Image: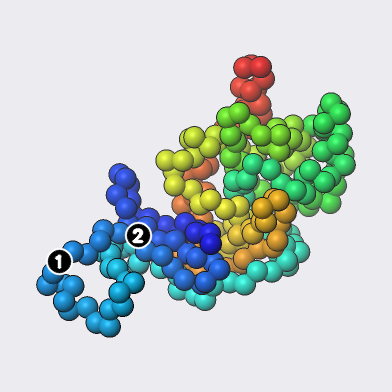
Amino acid sequence: MTLRFIGTTSDDGDCPTLYSIPETDEVLVQGERETDPEHLVQLRDVKPSETFVRVPRSLLTRYAPRDDAPTLQPFASISHLFREFRHTAWRLETRRGYASDRRSPKWARWQAGEDIANDPANAWRENVAEQTAAGKRFERVRLVDDPSTAGQRFLLASAPSNIAAGEDIRMLTRSQAAPLRLPDCDFWLFDSKILARFAFDDEDTTLGVYVTEDPAEVLTACQARDAAWHHAVPAAEFAERVASTV
């Protein structure tokens, strides 16, 4: 079963952290084991399999889920949000590749050595241009490995078309991202209010999205956005750095 990072009050390697277990709709709490004998004897209905940990109240105040876990729904169910958001649509991309990219005609062209940096407008880029012309922002941060994967190099090569349409795309190395404690999942965050978290299978195929306005989950996404955006560099600058090292 997978664990999904929710949030932590740890700043210096301390341990208080919350995780969700999506397959069971349960929450896992990480903290210091309770060893005080006077406390242990007061615990009720203890099963042999149970243990107990201490966590700061602030961990639960900030991050404990307040709503029922969202259900998986098709990505198409959020298509309207890319037109109807009022201020910012922000994306975190954490994966090393996407099946949708590898199956696209553009992937084959890129592998054949074609320049894919300035492709003509499509429905996505036309909407980006329309929304950014209205003063809205499309932003995303992509994590990149060292060395980068084929999927990451493909996205970097094709980024100029999206940037020309109005997206602000920035890159962050995975080694830089590690100490930021970013979530290990892709998501879209709309207006710092609606979170759409992706689900993928082992082949990088999108299974759907979990959509929520739960304050704890949205707060975690907002914190991730702020930290990632602060450290990421524009895609064009990153591409120049990569080119200079080849």
Q: Is residue 135 visible?
A: no
State the residue at coordinates (30%, 59%): 31
Q: Position of residue 63 (x, y in %)?
A: 41, 64
Q: Which amino acid does the dot numbered 1 rest on?
A: Asp
* Residue ID for mark 1: 36
Please identify the residue farthest to the front as the structure is shown.
48
Place of residue 92 in the rendered image (x, y in percent of width and height, measured from the top left)? 59, 48
Residue 141 seen in this snapshot? yes
Give, as a three-letter code, the residue at label 2.
Gln
At which x and y percent is residue 76?
76, 64
Q: Quadrant of residue 194?
A: bottom right
- Position above or below: 89 against 37: above
Query: Residue 155 appears at what percent x and percent y?
Result: 72, 37
Q: Nearer the viewer, residue 99 or 93?
A: 99
Q: Residue at x 82, y 46 (%)?
A: 103
Q: Residue furthest left?
A: 38
Q: Which residue is mark 2?
A: 30
The answer for how far apart the CA atoms under marks 1 and 2 are is: 18 Å
Q: What kind of element bears circle 2?
A: strand
Q: Quadrant of residue 236?
A: top right
Give the quarter of the figure containing the C terminus: top right
Nearest the eye: 95 or 59: 95
Give me the residue at 66% from left, 48% from top: 138
> For the residue labelled by badge 1, is the local secondary structure a helix, a strand or a loop?
loop
Looking at the picture, tell me which residue is in the foreground, 246 or 77: 246
Q: Residue at x 35, y 66 (%)?
A: 60
